[in-house]
Image (tube, helix red, strand yellow):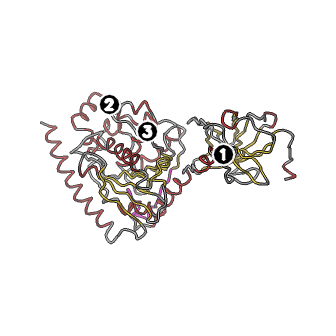
Amino acid sequence: MLLCVKRRLIGKFVKTIRKNWGASDAKRDAGLTTPENITRHDDLSYGPHGKWNLLDIYHDKDVDGKKPAIINVHGGGWVYGSKEVYQYYCMKLANRGFTVVNFNYRLAPEHRYPAPLEDINQVLCFIKEHAKEYHIDTENLFMVGDSAGAQLAGQYLTIYANPDYADLFDFEVPEVTFRACALNCGLYDMETCILEKQNPLFEAYVGLAAAEVMQKSGLIEENLKSIEYINGNFPPTFVMTAYHDNLKVHGKPMYELLTKKNVECVLKEYGSEAEKDVTHVFHVNCKLEQAKKCNDDTCAFFKEHIAFAENGAAARTGQMTEPVATGAQEKNGEVILKLKEETITPAGLTILICNDSDEDINFGRDFLLEEEKDGAWQQVTPVSEPFMTMDLLWAPAKSSEEMELYWAPFYGQLKEGRYRLIKPVSSQRKRLILTEEFPIGNRRIAKEQR
């Protein structure tokens, strides 16, 4: 009986939310129109659930070939929101050099958990199948989500990143590559939402009866414990909140969790006491200057993580490439790459990442080799596809970290000549490219003579 009363109350509450929030969003976007340089593909069906499974795609009119793409997961407390509410925000992202996918998903209380996650996955399947048609590079995908959409984006990317967690769901994630994500003004700990009854809309989303059972027993469904499954494979993350964000308290704990899990992460807070309009999901308001700054920062973070495949593809076909870095050695905020000269062989060497900065530095096992030819640096042609792992190593602030690099399986034994090692590393704020030269054979040219 009590559950029936709760359901009726939730139903009335949801109707009020949809009416009031809808009116507020319409006022926010009044006067906005589609930018002249944007092509939009509207109401594409990506799944079997009618209006719930429609998406829009936006990109530049003069787009040529595939582009990095942003998938937007809208907010709305799991009960409200649509692609129409987010269209102008998404087109602003498209103006910053991306193809953007903006979609509806099934909402509560009409549909319960995990319906939105299933729909997100179906969107990815659609993207995988129609990537060429809509100028999408499936090797360079990014995801943004705000409020409940941030929770959904974070949970879906945990499924993407952790096979053990993915096994708890009935769908299979398509083969795409997420390079980074932005979690905006979100709430992330679903277990706490249930046990502490922090959010009645979340209870409606998972089902009032199920929520009550979990609250009484303290036994939470395993697939609701998403943050416990976050690991180092989670994409680099831009965590955003605002001075007047009512979910602000959830931003820093998420950032700290990701950092603890060795995920490259930044935490940004926008606004001030005086800026009353910089509040929850302010970044969707295209008329705000702080929204412009936030979205510029987000897209800049994404662009730092775009992987350009052209160099690797050219190398595999035997073509030489333009140099990917310049200078005998790069010095980035007192982070320096050093080579242990006594370890240099035609098959590999040992490096030191010397971190004299005030930030921890993380790095994987990826690297490139270039050879000096005719006074220019050109990429060494691989003899086989490099195998890279998602392992992360760390050089804490004011320390050094040693790592052995053995390239013979990928590049073969190097011939006599002068070479340059290219090694990417990351701080919490930016991605750095470190370089250092070394000789093979008798061509030992002193650096001070170059």
Q: Residue 224 bears which disc, if any?
A: none
Dominant SS type (magenta) = loop
Front position among marks 2 and 1: 1
> Which badge, 2 or 1, is on the more N-terminal residue?
2
Horizontal side of residue 334 vs 47, given as left or right:
right
Q: Residues within 10 Å of mark 2 (few under 14, many from 20)?
A: few
Q: In this rendered view, identify the residue nearer to me: 216 or 314.
A: 314
Q: Is residue 147 visible?
A: yes
Can I make out residue 424 in this image? no
Real-space Cα separation, disc 2 to disc 1, in angstroms: 52 Å
Residue 178 is covered by the magenta coloring: no
Task: Please state the horizontal and vertical placement of residue 78, each as a whole percent of the image.
Answer: 29, 47
Lower position in the chain sequence, tag 3 or tag 1: 3
Seen at 59% across and 36% down, the residue is 388
3 vs 1, front mark: 1
Residue labelled with disc 1: 318
Determine which quarter of the picture holds residue 81.
bottom left
Looking at the rendered structure, the kind of residue marked 3 is: Tyr
Q: In the displayed structure, would residue 231 be above or below residue 297? A: above
Q: Disc 2 designates what residue?
A: 221
Inspect the image, locate mark 1, and give the three-letter code of the amino acid beneath it: Gly
- Discs 3, 2 touching: Cβ within 8 Å: no
Element at badge 3?
Answer: helix
Which stretch did the figure color magenta?
A: 267-281
Q: Position of residue 383 (x, y in %)?
A: 66, 38
Q: Residue at x 47, y 51 (%)?
A: 137
State the quadrant of the N terminus: top left
